[in-house]
Image (cartoon, rainbow, N blue to C red):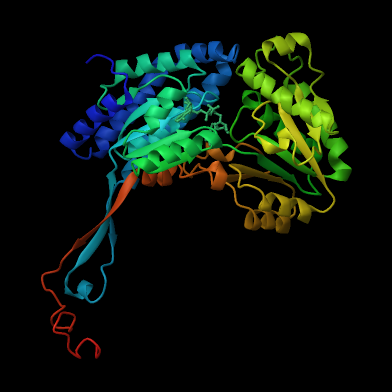
Amino acid sequence: MPRTTSARALLDVQRAAFLASGPDPDAVRQARLQRVIDLLVEHHEALCRAMEADFGGRSPVFSLMNDVLGSLASLKHARDHLPQWTPREPRPAMAPFDAFGAGAWVQYQPKGVVGIIGTWNAPLYTLLSPLASVLAAGNRAVLKPSELTPRTAEVLAQAVVAFFEPQELAVVTGGADVGADFAAQPWDHLVFTGSTAVGRLVMQAAAANLVPVTLELGGKSPVLVGRDADIAGVAERIAVGKSTNGGQLCVAPDVVWVHASQAEALVSALDTAWRTLFPTIAGNADVVPVINERHFARVESYIADAAARGAQIRMAGGWPDARGAAERRMPLRVVIDPPADSLIMQHEIFGPALVLRTYQAFEDALAAVAAGPRPLALYWFGSDADEQEQVLQRTLSGGVSLGDVCMHPAVEDAPFGGVGTSGMGRYHGREGFLEFSHARTVYQAGAQDPRRGFGMLPPYSDAFAQM
Ligand code: NAD
């Protein structure tokens, strides 16, 4: 079949195939997941080279770890666990019908055809990790990669054509206009990973067709550093998480809350940790460049705005230089206590900068985080068990890592998703399977209908009241 490029045409082809085949058994779903695994294994070098080119120098080793192995982990987990997820679940039928042989169960059925829109920062992972849950639930899928990583999108599209018939899995490429058209289709479910602003548009478009959505959005993920935290250790973990993908990570630490007396020590420890990871910045292939000039200028404008409003700007990993800037590779800028209305406090940073907010009482920091928009991730460092419990009880976020950053999305057996402005719905694990399944209740009548005998049918009698 020739490669079809319109979202609507692919949706129609897949829906017709879905209706014709009915829900596919576990073995067919596992074989599909295996084919995506095979596709990634066969094409991983070309995909990593494409990501290197799209980012202007992202290390292929990093792309292998982040996008290829990250996606493989989700796909393999779904392949191996779906037989535990798919069986129908018996449920007790209601009295008095249960006593007369009635039964009930919940049956998890595929919804049908799922559209998946991805981002540039993890151009494979944001498509293929949700796809693992989507395929495990027995659906067919159409993928829409980001236009900011066009080479990766093209290699993926060609690989999918080589491994799949379009009625099972397909790719549509293009920019925001294609995205808007994609979101306007009557999918059986729509997964969107991207910014909160575009997420609102996607949800509006989906609402017109009453299409259920999974929205994997961003936000300003906070780090709460407790009074008794080991500052050098905190700095090492933050440096590793914040430098991952050049800070262009949906769960990247964005605002760090630290006791005022420890702020200086934290900045200094971040500098040490950053220099250990990146002895040089310019020309260092381990430093992931900011994706393009527009995003580079965006991050720079946040720093300039904060500086103009009196915030202190500190460096970790050396001072920025012209060569690094030309490559869009920068050390970490630490912005201390910027005013609440500054750009860097109003927007997700999504780049190599970090806000440090100082507190006098941990309670105040906790209250401020709890009162703010609900983030995708929240991090806490410390050793006080009561403080940890307070953090977990009083805040709400998509997920949490304790004593580290950015780690909870890697737990394949547990849901990954946001809450509030950081999104809704989830993928990974059994919860991901449930997200893309319809939980259908089936009631099976018993041999006898007890309603007449119990006075439950007109003409009503006293028999029911005397039961
Ligand atoms: P974006 O919102 O600009 O674009 C995401 C996708 O939406 C792209 O494929 C784009 O073509 C498409 N799109 C653009 N306009 C559209 C429209 N009107 N209708 C439908 N689709 C449209 O996001 P981005 O810059 O690619 O990614 C960065 C954002 O994504 C950050 O906010 C980050 O936190 C978030 N993110 C979230 C997760 C997560 O799992 N929660 C993962 C990665 C990135």
Residue 187, x across and y down, in percent: 32, 36
Question: Which of 418/49 is in front?
Answer: 418
Q: Is residue 76 at all visible to an observer of this figure?
A: no
Among the 4 quarters of the image, the one containing residue 83: top left
Among the 4 quarters of the image, the one containing residue 26: top left
**What's the residue at 82%, 29% (across, down)?**
307
Question: Which of 379/147 is in front?
Answer: 147
**What's the residue at 68%, 30% (across, down)?**
242
Image quadrant in which the C terminus is located: bottom left
Q: How many tags in the picture?
A: 0
> Does residue 453 appear to the left or right of 2 in the view shown?
left
Residue 87, x across and y down, in percent: 28, 49
**What's the residue at 52%, 25% (across, down)?**
122
User: Does 162 appear above or below 415?
Assistant: above
**Farthest residue in the left direction?**
447
Q: Is residue 351 at all visible to an observer of this figure?
A: yes
Residue 137, x across and y down, in percent: 32, 40
Residue 37, x across and y down, in percent: 38, 25
> Does residue 414 appear to the left or right of 300 in the view shown?
left
User: Does 97 appear above or below 441?
Assistant: below
Question: Which of 159/460 is in front?
Answer: 460
> Does residue 439 appear to the left or right of 73 in the view shown?
left
Among the 4 quarters of the image, the one containing residue 110: top left
> Does residue 129 appear to the left or right of 227 in the view shown?
left
